[in-house]
Amino acid sequence: MKKEIENIYRPLPFWSWNDELDPQELCQQIEWMHEAGIGGFFMHARGGLKTEYLGEKWFECAEACSKKAEELGMLSYAYDENGWPSGFCGGKLLEEEENHDRYLTYSIGEYDPKATMSYSLDGEKLIRAHSGKNNLNVYDHMSTSTADILDRKVVRKFLDSTHEEYKKRDTYHLKGFFTDEPQYHRWGTAFTHALPEYYKKQYGKDVYDGLGLLFVEKEGYRQFRYEYWKAMNELMHQNWAKQIYDWCEENHYRLTGHYVEENSLQMQMQCCAGIMPMYEYEHIPGMDYLGRLVTPDHSLGSHQLLSVCDQLGKRQSLGELYGCCGWDVTPLQLKKIAESCYVDGLNILCTHLLPYHEEGQRKRDYPAHYSSFNPWIDKGFREFNDYLSFLGKHIATSTTDPHVAVLHPIRSAYFHFKREDEEHANGVGELDRALKDLMNSLDAKHILWHFLDETLLREHGFVKEGKIHLGRCVYDILILPKIYTMDVTTEQLIHEFVKQGGKILLNDEKPHYLEGKEYDYSYLNSNISLNEIVDTLPFVSSENINIRLNRRISDEEKIFYYVLNRGEQEEHLFLQDKQYPSFEAVDLYSGASKIVGNEIILQEGESLLLYPTEKKPEQNKKLSSLELPETWDVVGTPDNYLTLDKASYSFDGKKYGKTRYVMALFDELLRKRYEGDLYVRYEFEVKDIPSRCLALVEDTNLLEVSINGRMVPSIGVSRIESHIKEFDIAPYLKEGKNVILTKMHHYQKEAVYYALYGENVTESLRNCLAYDSNIEAIYLKGNFGVDGDFEPGKVLPEEVILGDHFSLTKQKKHIASLILDGFPFFRGDITLESEFDVTDTERELVLPSPYQIIDLTINGRKLGMFMFSKKIDISKYLVKGTNQIQMVLTVSNRNLLGESHTCQEENPSVYPDLWERLGLWEENSNVNYRDNYSFVKTLL
């Protein structure tokens, strides 16, 4: 039964428009989204797009999709760029040099008349020089790939070329825009021609007098760097964030999206010199969370975002989640990623990524992907989306009320940031580590707290009756992390806070500078300890870094505790509300509730809403653990797979080169700039000829396919991807070596070569390129088994198996391991049966290994579908003696499509280069390539 909930709380995926677009097909996908529990979408131009970005057909498709969304009560948003980062209008703004952003480099040596500025290094001060041999030469460069979003005029051009074009045609009922990763030049020391005038206005000085201090530590470098990076941040804040927001306000659109990079001071310095002020100028502030690792060190982004949302009363917040997680990420891991942010207050999921098509480069676009191409999606995605929607509504319709504030140390990062110093975390590694250690300590003790951003504090903060007010939030305790400096307005506020008796904890030594100049903070001393802060909380809890906790108040004024086990093992939490003895524990996924005491046990990824109550706890049933059987019988003959991702090529169909990984071949053809007919030869071994075998071949300018010298016609296209053609090759197979030969026409547009090989081209142009031809793997599908040579992985021996030298053989009917017993490349559903004996029926089934989805049946009685559970109470399904168990196991695309050839064996963060490594191939190798295959276990 579908759960009803308003679409404003439902997920809004990145819908990747990545091919030649067809309005009818797009609308069919919207109907699928609606059935899958999705509330709307972001129309996102992305790599592979062949329809002209912002051309008439683009707007025709946008209109059709927004109209369909309106019919279904869904929310349609436009993503504001082709690829990312936002601001260059898919390259249109780069046609004028004045729109490009800038960056600085330097050299040390003899005076260079070509330098923008030169400074003498003789003496303690840095002085402009026009001659000499011991000089610092600074050079101002134009970026090739990104626009200057710190320049107000350039941002206006961006609005005119993008937002205004949507507005002209807006019969669509667009809800708004997503802005993605706007940034100053992150690949070097950022600069802008908008800075000199602004710097002169703010500080009364010529910025060119001090540019060299960004690279060397001479007298006054702290003050100059403080002023420089604060000015850069303010230009981005005013000229980009506020200008875009004001336009959306005036034209009745909602602005959402995220700035970059949230999860460290180092990366914020590379991109924006401070993210938090930008959130004021979004209607739905957002963040990004990449990869599937959930660790304490990954919580900076959510703490920053949700501090501002609470302070400024922004009830909805959005997380772009799941990019880079890899095909084998499980629903439980996805739940844990989302909830590690929801526990701080996030409440809308932007699912990354739902592609329009999957062929070629598209299937490597930071997977996993959330369409029917992903095996578990059609089975469990609706329930997954329902769960996070209900949880998001609970968060969005409640508030939190921490009384502890932490001053954000981004201003102190200005002192030591040096973009060229990659070896030492750009100079801010020590500050980053100190901040994360403090955050982890506060979170482990379950102290509820917010960050104070100095820009927002200046605009919205004041002290009254010994408390710091920032927007709707009030704090009576201030923690100073490791910092070196602060703004004058911040110091004045803190000084007043101390005078009025406010409580302060110095987590490190007191600062020594004010806006980069030495200052006396002798009045600043700790008058409260961390343990005393814990005593002020309205609850008592055990310390545990793996359990996150937040105390919230619903709009109906009901208090509840939201607790999450973000660890990988079972965790125990003692929790006592100081006014109530027990809790009503509500599981939003199952809808079940029960009265529990103060000892809370949480499985990996498990979360609960705990409502304080006077009721007595229910007695827990004690269950013995039961593990899955070790061996299983395969039911039927499921379609199995073999990936053929090594090949050789020929220009004439006669002379072939070496057999190599297909991405190495593709790289070689790109570097040769080859255009013409291309023959690609794939070989595989057959020990036992199957009765059913299809070759799945991607249709990239495909002309013909043959097997063992016989031409084979296509019998249709794949159910899950229309650009994959199916060829019945079973009648032509033979024992021993078999050869599939494809013929195609190979070519690329010049834009592809420029994006790949143009001088100083960065990710923005590569993010929106579309290959005209691809060299891809072929996939065999049929009722065969796959034999090979296998060994345990070296990095994760329990989870990864390495293999090579595969051949088709008969399918085994009795297995203990999918990988070792004939199904190493398998994806999809496989039905397995087994037996086990019990003398005690009070049992819980333990599911210790990663899995996507399991449908369980015991003794002919269905238990249902599971995707989040680690332990399942099966008592009522058991009989004493022998029991029959059947499971339908859904297996991911990882072993078929995944990054099987990387040296890491398994990757917690997955991106296209793990396959492609374009420009880095030498014959069949590069620094990250393994010739054999890594396979990841899934339950078996």
Image (spheres, rainbow, N blue to C red):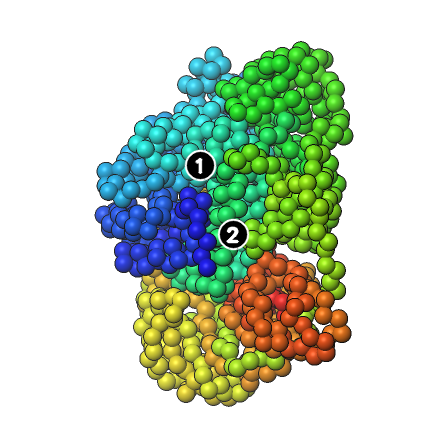
Q: Position of residue 876 (x, y in %)?
A: 65, 68
Q: Tell me the amino acid under the disc marked 1.
A: Ile
- Measured in 3D between alpha carbons, the distance from the residue under mark 1 to the one under mark 2, in whole angstroms, is 21 Å
Question: Nearest the camera: 553 or 702?
Answer: 553
Residue at image position (61%, 51%) is: 593
Residue at image position (58%, 18%) is: 490
Give left or right: position of 99 versus 878: left
Q: Residues within 10 Å of mark 2 (few under 14, many from 20)?
A: many
Q: Residues within 10 Å of mark 1 (few under 14, many from 20)?
A: many
Give left or right: position of 395 versus 536: left
Q: Secondary structure at mark 2?
A: helix
Q: Earlier in the sequence, mark 1 or mark 2?
A: 1
Quickly name the residue at label 1.
Answer: 284
Quickly name the residue at label 2.
Answer: 387
Question: Nearest the camera: 657 or 916?
Answer: 916
Number of the front mark, 1 or 2: 2
**CB atoms of marks 1 and 2 within 8 Å:** no
Residue at image position (27%, 56%) is: 23
